[in-house]
């Protein structure tokens, strides 16, 4: 039997995956965010990791009427590595 860490119960009773799936995404699609370190990119997609943690797909251009080719996307950024851009 294979047991995944995210299937273990957390101290509150639900599994870690259930707890992670309940977390909302902090950044909206199209929002300009800054990666820890100074690079600014736009949120192209809101996704989730295999354990339910919120992840983001980022792109260098704002998405307009025509969606960008997937090759311009950088996938898999966690919320902890991103911060809101201050005007």
Image: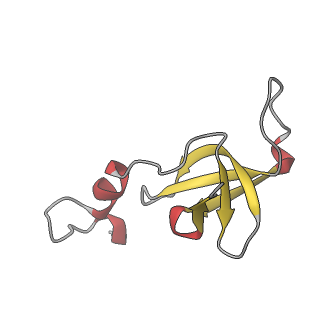
Image height of 86 relative to 30, above or below: below
Task: Return the residue found at the far bottom.
Answer: 37
Q: Nearer the viewer, residue 20 or 25?
A: 25
Residue shown at the point (29%, 54%) measured from the top left: 18
The location of residue 82, given as percent across then percent down, is: 59, 64
Q: Nearer the viewer, residue 73 or 41?
A: 41
Residue 2 in view (yes/no) = no
The location of residue 39, given as percent across then percent down, is: 76, 66
User: How many marks on residues?
Assistant: 0
Residue shown at the point (42%, 55%) measured from the top left: 52
Residue shown at the point (60%, 53%) measured from the top left: 56
Image height of 3 relative to 57, above or below: below
Task: Return the residue found at the far front.
Answer: 87
The location of residue 32, given as percent across then percent down, is: 68, 50
Image height of 5 relative to 24, above or below: below
Q: Is residue 67 left or right of residue 13?
A: right
The location of residue 79, given as percent across then percent down, is: 52, 62
Task: Return the residue found at the far top.
Answer: 65
Render colour scheme: secondary structure
* Rendered image quadrant of residue 17: bottom left
Q: Is residue 17 left or right of residue 79?
A: left
Quarter of the image where the N terminus is located: bottom left
Quarter of the image where the C terminus is located: bottom right
* Rendered image quadrant of residue 34: bottom right
Residue 44 in view (yes/no) = yes
Residue shown at the point (67%, 40%) measured from the top left: 30
């Amino acid at each position: 039997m294979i047991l995944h860490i995210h299937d273990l119960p957390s101290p509150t009773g639900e599994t870690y995956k259930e707890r992670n799936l309940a977390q909302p995404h902090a950044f909206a699609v199209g929002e300009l965010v800054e990666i820890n370190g100074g690079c600014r990119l736009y949120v192209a997609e809101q996704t989730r990791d295999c354990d339910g943690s919120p992840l983001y797909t980022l792109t260098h251009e704002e998405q307009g009427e025509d969606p960008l080719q997937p090759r311009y996307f950088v996938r898999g950024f966690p919320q902890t590595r991103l911060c809101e851009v201050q005007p």
